[in-house]
Image (cartoon, grey):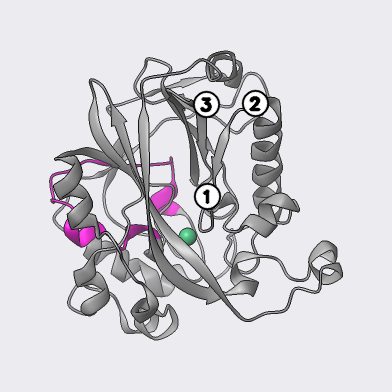
Amino acid sequence: MKPFTFKATTHRVTRAGLGAPVGSAVMEDLIDQPGPVEIRTVAADWEVPLSGVVNIKHPKAVQAGLKDGPEAIKIYAHVVRHPTHGVFLVDTGVSRQFVKDPAGEGVGWVLRKFQAIDKMKAHESTAEIIQAEGALAGVFMTHLHLDHVSGLPDIPKDVPIYTGADEAEAQLFLNLFAQGTTNNLLDGRPPLQELQFTKDPDGRFEGVNDVFGDGSFFAILTPGHTTGHLSFVARTPAGPELLTGDVSHTRWGWENDVEPGTFLAERQPSIDSLLKLKALSKRHPNMTVKLGHQP
Ligand SMILES: [Zn+2]
C-alpha cells in the first residue's frame, strides 16, 4: 500500500450482470472472423502537457528529441452497436454543459484549475451522439478519469455503467482531488457494474471477458494507467477493432513502445499492458487500432 492514496470514487459497485471471463485463446481464435458489432468513433479536441501522455525521459523519447509542451489530443467516445444488445458507448465523450459550467456539474476547483476543461471542444456532444444513435443500453468505461467521464452529464441517470474490477478502488494521489468530482458525476446513478476477470489461462493478459457472451465484443484487463483499466476488442464486419484506452494515449508512444508519462498509476504494469496490446495487434495484422487520445 502506497502512502497518500485515495479511491477514484466511493460510489457503490456491484458485479456486472453482463459478460463472463474467458481465456485469451478463445478470443484470439475468433477475432479475425468478421462480426456483427459496428463502431463509430466521435472525437472532441483537448490539449495536455506532452510529459503527461508520453514518458519523455524514456531513452527513445530523449533520442527523438521530444520536449515537454502543450500536445493536441482527442477525447473519444466510441459508439458500439450490437444487433440484439443495442447501443453502448465506450467512454462518455464530452458534454457541452460540462465544459460550459464544470462547477455546476460538480467538478472541484483543483481539477478546474489544473485540467484545462475550457480547452475541451466537443464537435458532436454526448447529447448529440445519443440523439443520433438512440437510447443507450449501457456505457463501458476504460477507466474513471475526468476526460473519460466528461460526457456523463448528458447520459440519463438510469443507464448502466460498466467498469473493470476494482476500478473504483484505483488508488492515485490525484484521486484526493478527483474523488469528490467523480462522486458528484455519478450521484443518483445505480452502482457501477464491475466486469469480472479471472487470470488468463493462456497467460497473455491479466484477464479477458466475453461481454455479450457471443464472442463479438471482449474487454481486456490492462492495468497500469489505473488499476482496473480496460481495453476492448470488437469483431466488426471489416475485421477486429482494438480500443486501447489510455494504455497508449499517443501515436508516437504506440509506435515506439513508450508508455505514458506522468499520467499513470503504476509504471511497470503500464509498460506490460502496452507491450501485450502491441503483441496482440501484431498477431492480428488486420486489426484496426484506436488509441486513447490520438488517431
Ligand atoms: Zn485519458
Residue 1, given in percent of the width and then of the height, sits at 59, 58
- For the record, the magenta segment spans 148-169
Amino acid residing under circle 2? His
Who is closer to the viewer here, 286 or 174?
Answer: 286
Mark 1–mark 2 distance (CA, rounded to whole Å): 26 Å
Amino acid residing under circle 3? Thr
Is disc 3 placed on a helix, strand or loop?
Answer: loop
* Foreground disc of the pair 1, 2: 2
- The correct choice, above or below, for 119 with respect to 233 in the image is below
The quarter holding residue 82 reads top left
Residue at the (13%, 51%) spot, across then down: 157
Some atom of ligand 1 lies within 8 Å of the CB belonging to the residue at label 2: no
Q: What residue is shown with label 3? A: 198
- The correct choice, above or below, for 144 with respect to 56 in the image is above
Q: What residue is shown with label 1? A: 227
Image marks 1 and 3: residues in contact by CB distance under 8 Å: no
Does 268 appear in magenta?
Answer: no
Residue 54, given in percent of the width and then of the height, sits at 66, 65
Residue at the (37%, 36%) spot, across then down: 39
Is disc 2 placed on a helix, strand or loop?
Answer: loop
* Foreground disc of the pair 2, 3: 2
Q: What residue is shown with label 2? A: 284
